[in-house]
Amino acid sequence: LCSVGHICSLKDAFGYENPSEIANLISAEKFEAALAIHLYKGGRLLQGSRIPFGIIFGGTDINEDVKHEEKHRVMGAVLEEARFAVAFTEKMKELAAAEWVCLYDYYRIPQDTENLRLFLLICGLRRVKDPLYLVDVFSEWHRREPHIHLVIIGPAVSCFFRLTPGVHLLQEIPQDDLHAAVKRCFAVVNSSISEGMSAAILEAMDLDVPVLARNIPGNAAIIQHKDTGLLFTDPQEFVQLSKSLMNDPTLEREIVTKAKAYVKKHHSWDGEREAYQNLVLRLHEIKKMSIS
């Protein structure tokens, strides 16, 4: 957005308590439009806003927050005010439309050794990411095959973590270092309970690293099993699939090649940039119409 002349300001929703604080910010900074990431966490702060705004679904809003009556009510009210909503997958769009009928009416959501095998799990240590899901099975696997390791990279947010043999925890590292680590690991793992669209998965695909992901809707929307990645339903299946991938270089090459092509076709920076530029232009036009 900045590259085409917009002046953008990124604010953390956790730094604000209520819509009045955002209203004061809008007035002070003279903002003309807004994008809220996450229908509840960000969207609720824009209720009653004097500027047009759009919503970008996060994942936990549609998958988890929708189960709470008060959050559901607030999110519905936010959608009534929003000018558009962005869903990363068809499934997410369908879930949102099923919850809030207004969407149908108003929106068209358009290594050190040759044998070492490192599996990398990139996530904040919080419940929805379920970082402990594979710890026990990895520890047992490492006991039998010491060259197998799981490395978890991410900040501790709200999840107690226990170290076990073969499982290693690293704090956040700069993005360039993280990408270098991804390229040196055997596979990237996703064990989340809920996902909107995992950037870690897409980045691994783009970096030519195979992905093993928990079979949940957000992951299944971007991974076709045994085509662009592998989907597992429980820790035991994860180990089985991992071993099959380790023992089948042809399958590994095919998955990496097809995943790279998928990302290039469906998740290019150019395509995403153009889409958001067009959405922001729509907000700008709405703002000019309301002034005139």
Image (cartoon, grey):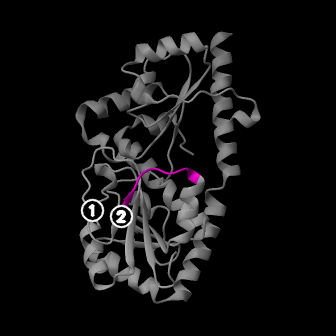
Residue at 33%, 51% in the rendered image = 125
Q: What is the span of residues highlighted in magenta in the rendered image?
A: 168-175
Q: Which residue is tagged 2?
A: 168
Q: Residue at x 62, y 59 (%)?
A: 266
2 or 1: tag closer to the N-terminus: 1
Query: How packed is label 2: few (under 14 Cα within 10 Å), some, or many (20 or more)?
Result: some
Q: Using the rendered image of the protein, determine whether residue 9 is visible from the camera's viewpoint.
A: yes
User: What count of labels does the image hold?
Assistant: 2
Magenta stretch holds residue 278:
no
User: Among all residues in the image, which is located at the extreme right?
Assistant: 4
Q: Are marks 2 and 1 in contact (CB under 8 Å)?
A: yes
CA neighbours of label 1 inside 10 A, class few (<14), some (14 to 19), many (20+): few
Kindly identify which residue carries mark 1. Answer: 163
Assign the C terminus to one quadrant of the image: top right
Q: Nearer the viewer, residue 97 or 71?
A: 71
Can you say whether 133 is above or below 14 in the image?
A: below
Callout 2 amino acid? His
Residue 174 included in the magenta stretch of the image: yes
Residue at horizontal 27 percent and vertical 73 percent from the top? 139
Q: Between residue 286 and residue 232, name the one nearer to us.
A: 232
Image coords of residue 260 (percent x, y): 62, 69
Q: CA distance from mark 2 to mark 1?
A: 7 Å
Give the residue displayed 46% in from the left and 30% down from the top. Answer: 12
Q: Amino acid at mark 1?
A: Leu
Which type of secondary structure does the marked residue at label 2 adopt?
strand
- Is residue 98 visible in the rendered image? The answer is no
Q: Is residue 281 left or right of residue 184?
A: right
Q: Report the side of 57 relative to 137 (left or right).
A: right
